[in-house]
Amino acid sequence: MFDLTDQPIDFHPTRQLRGAIIARGIFYNLSPDTDPEIKAQAALFEESTGKYEPPILEGLVALAYLLIGQEQLWISRIFTSLFWLLGGCVLFFLSLRMSRQSLLIQELSASDFVVYGSALTVAAYYLLLPFGVQASRSFQPDPGMVMWIIFTIFSLYRWGEKPAWKWVVMAGLFGGLAIMTKAVAAFIIAGAAIAVVIHTCGLKKAFLQIQVWCMALLMLLPTFVFYSSRSGRAAEFFMSWTVSLSHLLLEPSFYVRWLSLAGDLMGLAVLLLALLGVGISAGRNRALLLGLWVGYFIYGLFYPYQMYTHNYYHLQLIPIIALSLLPVCEVILGKIQNQRALWKAVTIAGTIAILLFLSWESILPQYAEDYRDEPLLWQEIASQLPQDGKIIALTQDYGYRLMYYGWRKVSLWPNRGEVKLMELRGNEKDFEEFFAKKTDGISYFLVTSFNQFRDQPILEEYLNQHFPVLAESSGYLIYKLNEKPQ
């Protein structure tokens, strides 16, 4: 809840503002007293964001807006933080069961110190990892997706302990909600489900189990129904992000970048300890952990570009690493419980110091940055935009800041990342031809992202040489495209 009311610019503002625009559209559509013109404009903005997944979180936030009678973006942070905390609670109880199972396999007494200490360590990593804290506050579906993944894993594990119908239904429903929330959850859930089913039933018998088929049906049917009417978009997404970028899988640098980003987010030493934990685990625990890791790896192969450019695509790795640390924690705590009181005290003091450090590091970005002036800035920019012609812009976050705060929608000039993507897909174009095509029928060129502008020197030089400046300030620059400079 720290810095709760700041604007959602701190973490992937493109995704957060997209959620804000969708929630606003739903809110105004449901509000009976909204001006019809404003309602139509909000609906137009909402539609322009595209439909990647069902607007579950956005709908909940919009309903909360209705209850209090106004938009308050900080409400989204309460929802996503609550999702993350609920996931942490279930992760703790799952860790308790896995730890007891592990000690049983090793024929060791289930010491409360080792069992609860290990489960608490798992929960602490999940809840206090700075990347997880920052990402779990963001207005996007990923925190909710991770919560449903954890609920699904817990239900699958309990089904593996005792194949009862209640765990079939719970695993199916939770898995279906996870995949509905964001379709990429399917990789992790499939990996865990296949591993647990094979370990429980065996490969041959698995196909004959009606419970397995019912579980799979519950997981996949809601998403199939939702996306069946959007098959064209799904195919386009697959061709654009998987097929056209599949050549990255043959480049060693791709895997180095992937590992580097994951190591930076999760802690490289912790990542290696987690992999060690998979190796020293046994029985059902090892099957589950292997399934989770295999699911994550296959997921990365389907989204190669995002694996080294988008940190929130690794958010579901946090509970996987946390659970994989459990066997390592058991070994360490098993040694500590036999030490003298002095060393136990040192361990406790060190643990408290680490928790305090992680807590401070988690809130430091919010403490250091303030985005409360963003609405006024973009409202000012919007007020300076001409009304007598179309506008194309090199601007932040796909124009979402201008759209949300300034209520103005513009066409978009590709940013640095999109130019790089065009090169990776082999779609490089002649600049002048590309410029003429993109600005056909456009009267003005708006620049608000000056870092991006400097990164495209050809564009900057071309605009300065061929078109006059209509207006400029420290926050924006407007070129007039339909007349040449004197």
Image: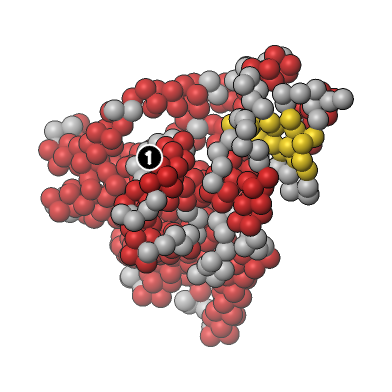
Give the residue displayed 52% in from the left and 61% down from the top: 133
Residue at the far front: name it. 388
Question: How many numbered circles are shown?
Answer: 1
Give the residue displayed 66% in from the left and 41% down from the top: 385
Q: Residues within 10 Å of mark 1 (few under 14, many from 20)?
A: some
Q: Nearer the viewer, residue 430 or 196?
A: 430
Q: Quadrant of residue 232?
A: top left
Q: Is residue 45 left or right of residue 148?
A: right
Q: Is residue 149 left or right of residue 203?
A: right
- Coloring scheme used: secondary structure
Where is residue 475 shown, x and y percent of the image? Answer: 74, 48
Q: Is residue 159 left or right of residue 101?
A: left
Q: Quadrant of residue 120?
A: bottom left
Give the residue displayed 23% in from the left and 48% down from the top: 173
Where is residue 326 shown, x and y percent of the image? Answer: 43, 60
Q: Which residue is mark 1?
A: 53
Q: Nearer the viewer, residue 440 or 83?
A: 440
